[in-house]
Image (cartoon, rainbow, N blue to C red):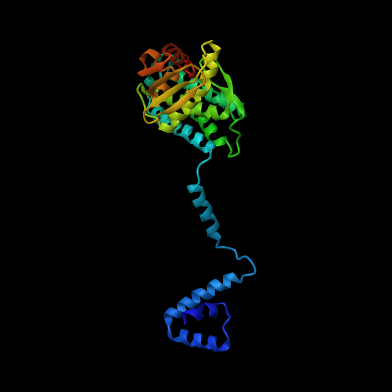
Amino acid sequence: MDDLLGAWALDVCDDTEAAAVQAHLDECPACAAEAGRLRAAATWLGAEQVTSPPAHLRQSVLDRARRTRAPSTLHTLIGAYARQVAALDRTLRDLTAGDWRRPDPRHGDLTGLIRHLTGNDARLAGDLQLPVVRMPTARVRDAWRTQADTLIQSLADDTDLEQGVTLAGRAGPSPGVLRDALVQRTFETWIHHEDVRGGLLAPPAEHVRRIVSLAVSLLPGAVAARGLARPGVGLLDLTGRAGGRWSLPFGDFVLRADATDFARLVANRRRPDHLDYTVEGDRRLAEQMLAVASTLGCD
């Protein structure tokens, strides 16, 4: 009888076979259930038009796909920036009026530091033709957060990460691309959070790796501008949670250090002679490279 159920479901049995199958199904609930499933499947095989799925099915499938697909590069960079913004904002929220007047060696006090950070965020917003906040004399935290949120919330999925924008820098603005500017915004927000707290934080490893990669991309031009470039290939062999290897198109050395410490050096928060590192090969050029790297931050 099992052999006939498929034929019965497809309606290709002769009258005798069909009658025999029907008689069996009347007495066998298990076969009747199986026959019902086969007949339903056969109905779909013979469908001549598409039947619309339940209304909720399309949205549930799309929602699941969005949760499981890999995030775009833009979303990854914006997410990293948003994470650092939220962390800094939690710290600023708890500052007293006296805390805001606490001296800062680069910007006078913490109010001046957040004004500086807001100004660099605003420069990028202006490059992208996004709203730029008016800096008030008070409530600088609100102005900074408004400007940061504008960057976080206003970039569309199809935003060109290679479009030209301005990168902040200790020596003044320089041309760059949006991809690097978003990494820089994440970097500067983290560093100034450490400035506000007066202590070290542990940023996610992927944030540090992107910061190191940005610094490595800027180093060749900065080294060449100082007349220090030499033939060969140098190697940064960085350790720790964010460790990895980065090649430099000059010199003949291998420099080993902790990746997060190197990022702090790039931010000018660690002096080259206070960095724990080792060198194989051209030590003098490696030391000169570290000195140049320490000038690449936004201060």
Q: Nearer the viewer, residue 106 or 48?
A: 48
Q: Is residue 298 above or below residue 178?
A: above
Query: Residue 64, how many percent across, how many down?
Result: 49, 52
- Quarter of the view holding residue 269: top left
**Residue displayed at 49% across by 79% down:** 3
Q: Nearer the viewer, residue 189 or 4?
A: 4
On the question of residue 198 being in view, the answer is yes
**Residue displayed at 39% across by 17% down:** 279
58 sits left or right of 108 in the view: right
Q: Is residue 226 above or below residue 137?
A: above
Q: How many marks do you count on the picture? A: 0
On the question of residue 132 being in view, the answer is no
Query: Residue 23, how many percent across, how many down?
Result: 48, 88
Query: Residue 147, how many percent across, how many down?
Result: 53, 29
Query: Residue 117, how many percent across, how many down?
Result: 49, 22
